[in-house]
Image (tube, grey):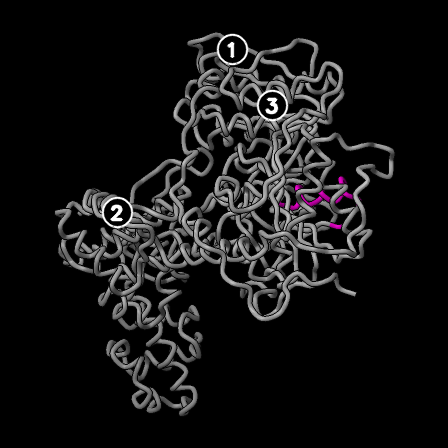
Amino acid sequence: MDNLEQLSGVVAAVRFVGEEGFQILTVQDAEEREVTLVAVCQPLNEGESIEAHGAWTTHPRFGQQFKAERLVTQVPRESKALGAYLASGKVAGVGPTFAKRLVAHFGDGLRDVLGDEKALRAVPGIGKKKAARIAGSWNEYEEAREALIFLQGHGLGASRAMSVFRQLGQDTIAKVSANPYRTLLKTRGIGFRIADTMARSMGFELTHRDRIIAGLRHVVDARSTSGHTLATSGELASEGAKLLEVDVARTTSVVELLLAHEKLEQVDGGLVGLPALINAERTIAAALLARAVPWEDCGLASVDGELSDGRVLSDEQREALVTCLAYGVAVLTGGPGVGKTTVTEVLAQTLDDSRYELALCAPTGRAARRMSEATGRPATTIHRLLGAGANGFEFNADNPIEADVVIIDEASMVDVQLFRALVVALPDHCRLYIIGDQDQLASVGPGNVLRDVIASGRVPVARLQQIRRQGEGSQIIVQAHAVNQGHPPQSVPGSDFEIVAVPEGSDPELVLEEAFRVATTEMLAHGFDTLHEVQVLTPMHGGPVGTRSLNDALRAYHIPGDRGSVTINGRRWAAGDKIVQTENDYNREVFNGDLGFVVAADPEEKTVLARFEDREVLFTSDALGKLQLAYAMTGHKAQGSEFPAVVIPLARSHWHMLERQWLYTSITRGKRRVVLVGHPSAIERAARHVTGRRRLTSLPFWLAQPAASTEEGDPHGQPSA
């Protein structure tokens, strides 16, 4: 099946036990040599016999070690060895004393009776309760061992096998045997290809229906990862046939079966998608269309177009404000520097003066803070507004939020599932104002809500086009607009926007060196705090100019000599480390894209204390995998944030990731200084290349339908008292 080497022996010492089953062991092999074994598996004890399959490697610090891909335990049958094994405490209720009694009573037949309560009660000192405890513990262990042998025997790695067993327990073998696709794909870290490899090892045919269904679901999920909520039935069948290596007629028939059983839904001819995503877009459309009508309100304060600090709206801004106030829903859109923030401030002020209960929100914590600073009113993340928790959202259709008006900023970042959660939680009388730049990167999740809504023509849209925020000599906004129109940006020496050209054809490592110099020495010379005010943005994680390489270099600069660092779960942590949360953590109320700094790391407790905005959050070891270094980030992770200074390295090695929306979005993250560093051809490619703008979604179809008639009662009521 593979070319893995084998190591058999007895565990002589357990040297380290980490999270998720990670262990470092000393094993005495068949020739009585002591070797180091690194594995992710069930907890092991001294005296336990193991059989591991993997490869010999050489660690730069710890030397030669055997890294196991698969590992199973072999409980000794000989009474003396089994007694030593039981004495280690592996079986509940058995310590050194009772291990000796069991060996003395049963001899070499002990292993055959450890799961038999009746037999165990024949041993002096073992009563009914203790016998039940010993037998139960032994039988659980045997089930785990058998399950792991079964899973690993069919090619599943030790780490993933442990994850599957933790989820399925004693039913592991039965459930996986019945449908390996359905059961394995529920386990984190196992995708279709891994599940398919195991299923094929178990004898599942290429054309097995469960395999075809799982493969088609994989295709749909892959498309949703790219932002699509729909595919043509022909595309789905064709892509599925290619993945599964079967005839397209077979996948076509299963697509039809899934449609018949409502596992897929068809809309607008031959377009199909997952019902959950289609229903989300249908719900969004219904909520918007119900509000996309003039809302009469004699209690609304008059619009004078002047802010409290004396600023006066332009005619374009005043028209945008009037459009928003006239309807129950409206979109305010435009590029950087055109005054969206100013109009939002006046909009909030006008509604506040009219005693409306406002709720201001944005997708990320940094965007919410900027919104709060701009409007002078509290703003929160969408997740916090909805009361996000481990079991979902506190506020929903049955328990709506208490607000007369919701204003959402950076709406281009919001995917269909989160947008649906927001609109269903609105009271019927609540207005909704959607603010964003449709030319920025679309949401990471499925859908294209902001662009679909604007393009539909069914929802009032206020467009701002005249550049307002441009100080003397400022070029950031000018160059961002140039990029958005497909023109390569131009360096303007002495301004807030410059390009450091790296010789064409030079190695990407030179781009990294120059980006590092600009982000440290040069930015420091311009008066920036290089840790808190400078952000490096790059298109990729891997490669010589990816986030990993840049973070390594920048961390060495900011944490010289690894000062104060400690190791937790194999990673180095130090006070001052710049970090970003990569997944939503509802229990800690820290969400994907939130930026913070490490305050302290405790290697004994295996915890990291971090500060996010104005609060400190404690991360236990199980949550540390969701944190990444953020001295350098991708442009997607930075969306919704602004930084005083931004450095953007672009190398030819990024070629397939260089794209106009990405560059436009990244440039607009900078407030006071932006520097592009890279190969001229890479910078030109990024400005001219357009891809991924079109996402196939069902929202345009639903927005084109007639608006549903208003239910009994007036949804356009007066503000809350």
Q: Main secondary structure of the magenta part?
A: helix
Residue segment shown in magenta: 364-378
Left/right of residue 407 with respect to residue 261 in the rendered view = right
Q: Residue at x 30, y 63 (%)?
A: 262
Q: Amino acid at mark 2?
A: Leu
Viewer-closest of 181 and 284: 284
547 is within the stretch colored magenta: no
Q: Amino acid at mark 1?
A: Val
Viewer-closest of 328 and 186: 328
Does the residue at mark 3 contact the one at mark 1 (Cβ under 8 Å)?
no
Q: CA distance from mark 2 to mark 3?
A: 40 Å
Q: Amino acid at mark 3?
A: Val
Reading the image, the residue beneath label 2 is 236
370 is within the stretch colored magenta: yes
Q: Residue at x 57, y 28 (%)?
A: 666
The answer to whether one can see residue 29 in this image is no
Left/right of residue 129 with respect to residue 306 in the rendered view = left
Q: Which element type, helix, strand or loop, lies under badge 3?
A: strand
Q: Residue at x 74, y 44 (%)?
A: 347
Question: Residue 214 occupies which quadrant of the picture?
Answer: bottom left
Q: Is residue 693 above or below residue 83?
A: above
Q: Is residue 526 above or below residue 245?
A: above
Residue 142 horizontal/vertical position (percent)? 31, 71
Nearer the N terminus, badge 2 or badge 1?
2
Question: Residue 205 occupies which quadrant of the picture?
Answer: bottom left
Q: Which element type, helix, strand or loop, lies under badge 1?
A: loop
